[in-house]
Every structure is written in C-alpha cells, then in structure tokens.
Amino acid sequence: MNPWIVLLLLIVVLSPLALLMPSRRQRGRMDVRLQARRLGLAMQLSRQEWPHWLAQEPPVSCAQYHRARRRGQVDSWCYWQAKPGTWLNKWREPCADASLAAQLAQLPADVYKVEATTQMVALYWGERAQADSLHKIADFLLARA
C-alpha cells in the first residue's frame, strides 16, 4: 500500500512540471524564430488592428519580422493579403508596382500584412512552419530593405 501512496504523491508533485514543457507547436515556432535570427531578421510580437474586409481574421497578436532599410529609401507602402495571392492596399486597390507584386506573389499564404517605412520593412506572419517559408520571407525582406 505504501508504494502506491508514494507513487501518487510523486505524480501530484511532478504533474505541474509537465505543464511547463512547451508543446510541439510552440517548439516549432521557437525553432523558426531562431532560424530567422540566424538569417539576420528581427522578430517581435505585435498587436494589430486588421481591416474589416479581410476574408480571414488574423490573430490580434501576430509575429512581426522586420529588417532595417538602407539609407536613402523613401518609399512607403502597406499591403494586406485579402486571400492567398491577392494583395490590396488600404483602399482595396491591388499593388501597382510590378516588381513588388511579383515578390508579394512569392510569399506564403499565412503572411497577413507587409509594410515599408523609411526606416524598416516589416512582415506579419502566422508562422505555420513550412520548410521553405522562412527563406521566402527572408529573401523578400532582404530584397526590399
């Protein structure tokens, strides 16, 4: 009888430790973020207010991958992916710049928003880890920075 009581007490004491272990999904996101850092990208969680006209509502807190822009870049733009492959600005107009539209078409379907300011290029991603998604994102940010 005593060994069963000891075993039960051990389970009760050690069970909260199991809750501290990251899930497979969380470990996958951590791996993606470490790979992004190795590729020279910065990442932070950012709260966003999304346009009401998006087909799928993105999460409120989203991973923002960004890279600083080179000096002399003065163009500013912002596009949302309304549905996979369709990039629209805040007036729901498609991207008019052919080279930018071609690069946007290469991005994964779970990239919600891409914006550029004079200081940085930022991309908001759902982080569903496919093998080549991070490399596509890194290539885009490097090309537009």
Image (cartoon, rainbow, N blue to C red):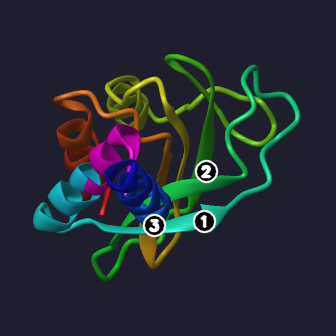
> Circle 1 sits in a helix, a strand or a loop, which is it?
strand
- Kind of residue indicated by mark 2: Cys
Q: Is residue 69 above or below residue 9?
A: below
Q: Is residue 99 visible?
A: yes
Q: Which residue is mark 2?
A: 78
Q: Which residue is mark 3?
A: 13
From the viewer's perspective, tell me whether residue 61 is left or right of residue 84.
right
Instruction: Indicate which disc, 3 or 2, sits on the residue closer to the N terminus.
Output: 3
Density class for disc 3 (Cα within 10 Å; few <14, some 14-19, many ≥20) is few
Pick the front one: 30 or 141: 30
Instruction: Indicate which disc, 3 or 1, sits on the residue closer to the N terminus.
Output: 3
Tell us which disc is closer to us: 3 or 1. 3
Q: Which residue is mark 1?
A: 46
Q: Magenta region: which residues? A: 21-30
Q: Does 76 appear in magenta?
A: no
Density class for disc 2 (Cα within 10 Å; few <14, some 14-19, many ≥20) is some
Q: Residue 9's image quarter?
A: bottom left
**Which quarter of the figure is the C terminus placed in?**
bottom left
From the viewer's perspective, tell me whether residue 121 is left or right of residue 139.
right
